[in-house]
């Protein structure tokens, strides 16, 4: 695959006091991802894209279900998928507490929904580079660790996106600059999708990146990032 330069995009850091969607309070079992900046970026993008009544939406790697609940509050018909039993239990509990009609399935990405297609897919997948060559099967790291280049899950989503989207369908994906967003743009473009980078925001390292900063520097991933990480939202449309 030929690497592409990452298109320019505005820096849309959520501003204190700015009107922004709130994914809302959620219950999380131990080891389930806590909604944070990347979650908020996707929630903002979903509202900006007009997700609402009549949208058949899939939330891949749903975690606590925060984005699925946000989509349901916007009026979308929502299906949420995660491979983690604890994530699925958390998402189902939050759906029940919110009294929103979200269908939550356990499964390995699109294998959980063979043959299904959607108007929109949103995903906040594991994307942090990790020393282990495979994604973990247990523990909290399952929410973020994604192999040495951070792309164990991202590449699979990119390769399957065209097939799961209906004509005119939309993919919204968030990832770290450490996991080569330019490769995501390239894969989605080669699959036949119209791809743009809609948002960038730079945030201080969280505890996971801080703990493995020496390893990331040894791999050359932190040359220009002494203590901050870029998050990127990528938008892909099927014509």
Image (spheres, grey):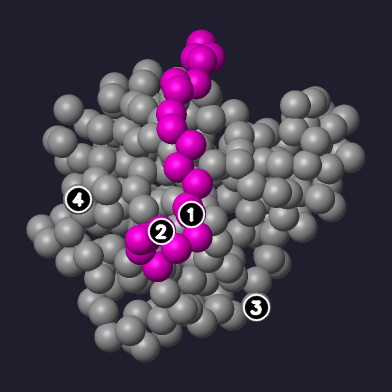
Instruction: Work out how far the residue at label 4 is from the one at label 2, CA to CA, in angstroms.
Output: 19 Å
In terms of image quadrants, where is residue 56? bottom left
Instruction: Work out how far the residue at label 3 is from the one at label 2, CA to CA, in angstroms.
Output: 31 Å
Q: Which residues are magenta?
A: 1-22
Mark 3: secondary structure: loop
Above or below, 186 against 163 in this view is above
Q: Are marks 1 and 2 in contact (CB under 8 Å)?
A: yes
Q: In front: mark 1 or mark 4? A: 1
Instruction: Work out how far the residue at label 4 is from the one at label 3, CA to CA, in angstroms.
Output: 33 Å
Q: Which residue is mark 3?
A: 30
Instruction: Work out how far the residue at label 1 is from the one at label 3, CA to CA, in angstroms.
Output: 29 Å
Above or below, 162 against 134 in this view is above
Q: In front: mark 4 or mark 2? A: 2
Above or below, 222 against 99 in this view is above
- Considering only order in the chain, which callout, 3 or 4, is on the residue closer to the N terminus? 3
Does the stretch in magenta take in 132? no
Q: Which residue is mark 1?
A: 15
Q: In front: mark 3 or mark 2? A: 2
- Considering only order in the chain, which callout, 2 or 3, is on the residue closer to the N terminus? 2
Q: Residue 144 at x, y = what percent?
A: 63, 54
Indicate left or right for 226 with 118 as reference.
right
Q: In front: mark 1 or mark 3? A: 1
Q: Quadrant of the C terminus?
A: top left
Q: Which residue is mark 4?
A: 50
- Which one is nearer the viewer's eye here, 79 or 221? 221
Mark 2: secondary structure: loop
Mark 1: secondary structure: loop
Q: Which residue is mark 2?
A: 18
Does residue 2 appear anywhere in the picture?
yes
């Amino acid at each position: 695959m030929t690497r592409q330069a990452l298109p320019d995009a505005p820096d849309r850091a959520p501003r204190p006091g700015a009107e922004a969607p709130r994914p809302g309070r959620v219950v999380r079992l131990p080891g389930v991802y806590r909604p944070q900046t990347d979650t908020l970026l996707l929630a903002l993008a979903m509202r900006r894209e007009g997700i609402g009544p009549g949208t058949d939406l899939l939330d891949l790697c749903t975690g606590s279900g925060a984005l699925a609940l946000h989509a349901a509050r916007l009026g979308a018909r929502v299906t949420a998928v995660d491979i983690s039993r604890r994530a699925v239990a958390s998402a189902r509990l939050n759906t029940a507490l919110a009294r929103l009609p979200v269908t939550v399935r356990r499964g390995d990405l699109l294998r959980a929904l063979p043959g299904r297609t959607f108007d929109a897919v949103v995903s906040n997948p594991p994307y942090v580079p990790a020393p282990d060559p495979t994604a973990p099967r247990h523990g909290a790291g399952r929410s973020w660790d994604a192999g040495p280049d951070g792309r164990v899950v991202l590449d699979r989503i990119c390769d399957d996106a065209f097939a799961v989207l209906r004509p005119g369908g939309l993919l919204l994906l968030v990832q770290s600059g450490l996991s080569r967003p330019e490769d995501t743009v390239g894969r989605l473009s080669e699959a036949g999708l119209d791809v743009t980078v809609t948002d960038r925001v730079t945030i201080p390292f969280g505890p996971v990146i801080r703990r493995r900063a020496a390893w990331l520097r040894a791999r050359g991933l932190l040359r220009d990032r002494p203590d901050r990480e870029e998050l990127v939202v990528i938008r892909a449309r099927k014509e």
